[in-house]
Image (cartoon, rainbow, N blue to C red):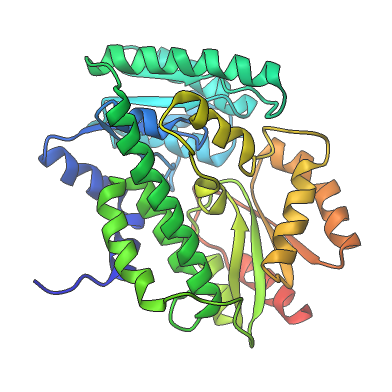
Amino acid sequence: MSKIDFQEFAAEAARNPLGQIARYKEKNRRLMGFLCSYVPEELVYAAGFIPLRLLGRATQISLADKHLQAYCCSQVRAFMEDYLQNEYKDLEGVLFAQTCDTMQSFYDIFKKNFPDMFSFNFNFPCKVSGDAAFKYARAELARVRAELEKFAGNPIGRDELNNAVRVYNRNRDLLDRLYMAHAANPDKIPSVTLLHAVMASMFMDKKDINKLLEEFVNQFGANGGPAAGRKKLMLVGSVNVNEDVYNAADEYGAMIVDDDICTGRRYFDGKVEAPNDEALLRRYFDRAHCPAKHRDLTSRGRYLTELAKKSQADGVVFLYLKFCDPHAFDYPYMKDMLDKAGIRSLHMEIEQSSAPSGQTRTKLQAFIETL
């Protein structure tokens, strides 16, 4: 059997999630979609499902316009379009998590339009600090566990949860190693491989992707810091399926050295320290949080500034989906904090449901030249 080229495999998996769904369905695996990284994947996995992160892929919106206004974010509209086009017919259900107002409203719209499908909303608190918030989150997680066990037809045992925690923590370790290997070897590992690897991890059984990812990163051993000779960029934003930003950065003599995005480091940041519900929640409270959550008024700004310094980033690119209010609200003060730290930044607005634009590449090229 010929050795699998990980970079080609990850690219194919990232670009074709429906292909992964079809392959698992042929093996009679149970599949559960989810829409946010605050969904407790380990519980879903321990219940006997493969959790699959759903990212709207539709580039032409027609059916979704009957249910969602044009000023809703393109991620939600594209996902609704995919579902109305019956793209996800092989999934047994969809799990949501409380994040922004648009996603919360979308859950209500989804339940109304797909009443026969299992769907559940994890009302994760907006505040990720303090005993009261943690107590509330524990009660909510108990509801998620009960609904999953009822729908799966079996209890979630400690052994099953222990296995899920082990598999998921391994994936997080390997993705972190990949980021370090890329930083030290940008000529051998292009920036877009980071995006492909994270997205492939979202669309596959973690056990399957872990084997291939481990073989790949083991080629690079223990690496040092970022390689010299390229300008280093850090991406900040929500979800992103646009490969063009990564490819353009490499093409113009730079590299994506790190990120804080839902389809990047924020997805795999932190580890679950024990096979129990409290440890699952503790990871969500301790990890890098998105702008829909908060510890205090400037916690995200402090985190991003420190991450940029740690990764030795020359510049930060805010890659925001159009009409994404939480990120838009955060941007002014975070830009100010980066400015005070002497770190240049660029703001770019994208649409999930549109093809890469020449304007995006031109803005990125000009920004890299200023660095």
Taking the image as drawn, is residue 114 in sight? Answer: no
- Classify the position of the C terminus by image quarter: bottom right
* Image-quadrant location for residue 46: top left
Measured as percent of width and height from the top left, residue 351 is found at 57, 49
State the residue lying farthest toward the left: 1
Measured as percent of width and height from the top left, residue 237 is found at 64, 50
Q: Is residue 344 left or right of residue 119?
A: right
What's the residue at 38%, 38% (across, down)?
Answer: 165
State the residue lying farthest toward the bottom: 229
Total numbered circles: 0
Q: Up-down: is 228 above or below 63?
A: below
Q: Up-down: is 182 above or below 59?
A: below
Measured as percent of width and height from the top left, residue 59 is found at 44, 48
What's the residue at 34%, 34% (across, down)?
Answer: 162
Q: Is residue 278 left or right of residue 205?
A: right
Q: Up-down: is 123 above or below 238?
A: above
- Classify the position of the N terminus by image quarter: bottom left
**Camera-side residue of 288 and 279:** 279
* Image-quadrant location for residue 368: bottom right
